[in-house]
Image (tube, rainbow, N blue to C red):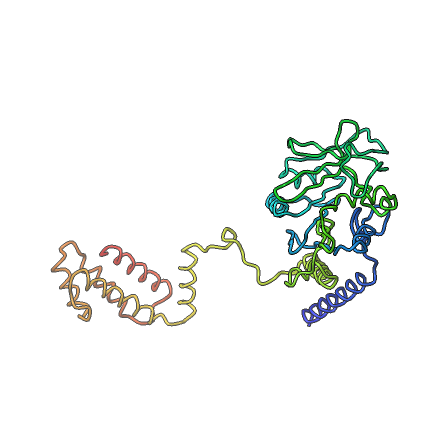
Amino acid sequence: MTRLSDNRLIAGALVGIVLVAVFTLLVSPPPPAPALSVRSAASDGAMALSLWLEQSGFTVRQVLSNPIKFGEIDALLVLNPLYPYADAEALRIREWVEDGHVLIVAGTAPFIINDLLSVFDVSLRYLPSPVQNLSPALPTLRSPPVETVSASASYVIDSTRDDIVVHIANGADPVLISFQQGAGTVWVSGLTQPFTNRGLGDEQNARLVLNLLSNVPEQSIIGFDEARHGFQEASASLSGWLVSSPAGWGILLALLLTMTFLSLRGRRFGRPIPVPEERLRREPVEYIQAMANLLRRSGQPDEMLKHYGGRLRRSLSERYAVDPHLRDDEMVKAIAYRDADLDPAQLRSLLGRLARNRLGEQELLDTIKDVDDWLRKIS
């Protein structure tokens, strides 16, 4: 009855926790999107950029797959990723660019972005003394013309390439470059403010973004890598549903609490199995004593004498090649004829005691002991 009550308690608690967890996750507000995410309406988000590009005639898509599924994407914006790129994925992105596409990279975490830029022989590093107002280094940003960018350059760009074009520099340090990679183009920016909701409010920043997309035709598909901001597409598998949906989170939480409950109560799953070192091993004498006690409790001493008498006769028959069914005197004579060292009187006495009935307990034990001595002697 106690076990049934425990099972009902656990089942009820499991259902209750799942319902509470699902309800809590559904009614609670979602966590704020990170900086430069197209899902963020904060000042450092990129929602305005996404909406503005759609109004400008482009098709905007959020890339939620990891690794990236390019599909029909013509230009990819990687803005402030929170998770690094694997080497294999960085090489896939480079191959995609070489097929004639546009890649735009900007962010505030060089140790993450450099995992992607390393396949292009480019890297970002922190700039300790940024300048707020920057001007183009060359008259290359002309579609539309950019005169001054009001954005603090926090990072500079290092590269061993000899084909980069420096568009904006902070003194001698480039902060916005581009270069050809196969048939495609790569833009790397140490400036992040022009892509933000607040930054796009400045006309010069908006002009700068349009220059980055000047080679991308209208009606093209522009993708934002939102998977690196922690937004993943829903999985069709059970495991993906468990880790990506509120109901799945509730079930996992309930299972965790249930296992914790069982472990704290010390409940065992199945019968305990002792380790071999802890198993009790009986001594041989214990088995002999147990058999002797069973024979004593049986109350059949005559059967015991028959057993030991038959055993002795079989051994004598095998040892001296005589008929085991001979009478005692005939068997003793036949054995004495074959073995001159044998004591006929001792063997005759033992066979006579085995043929008697109702021996006392001590006499019975002495007789059995003598039988064992004879068995060892003729074996």
Residue lying farthest to the left in this orientation: 337
Q: Nearer the viewer, residue 186 or 374?
A: 186
Horizontal arrangement in the rendering, residue 375 relative to residue 178 (left or right) = left
Q: Nearer the viewer, residue 94 or 362?
A: 94
The image position of residue 335, as x and y in percent, is: 15, 61
The image quadrant of residue 26 is bottom right
Number of numbered discs overlaid on the protein picture? 0
The image quadrant of residue 221 is bottom right
Residue lying farthest to the top in this orientation: 172
Q: Nearer the viewer, residue 145 or 343?
A: 145
Q: Nearer the viewer, residue 379 or 132?
A: 132
Horizontal arrangement in the rendering, residue 352 relative to residue 149 (left or right) = left
Horizontal arrangement in the rendering, residue 82 relative to residue 295 (left or right) = right
The image position of residue 140, as x and y in percent, is: 76, 37
State whether residue 4 is above or below residue 216: below
For the N terminus, which image quadrant? Answer: bottom right
The image quadrant of residue 263 is bottom right
The image position of residue 117, as x and y in percent, is: 66, 39
- Residue pictured at 83% horizontal, 33% vertical: 134
- Residue pictured at 26% horizontal, 55% vertical: 376
- Residue pictured at 40% horizontal, 71% vertical: 299
The image position of residue 92, as x and y in percent, is: 60, 47
For the C terminus, which image quadrant? Answer: bottom left
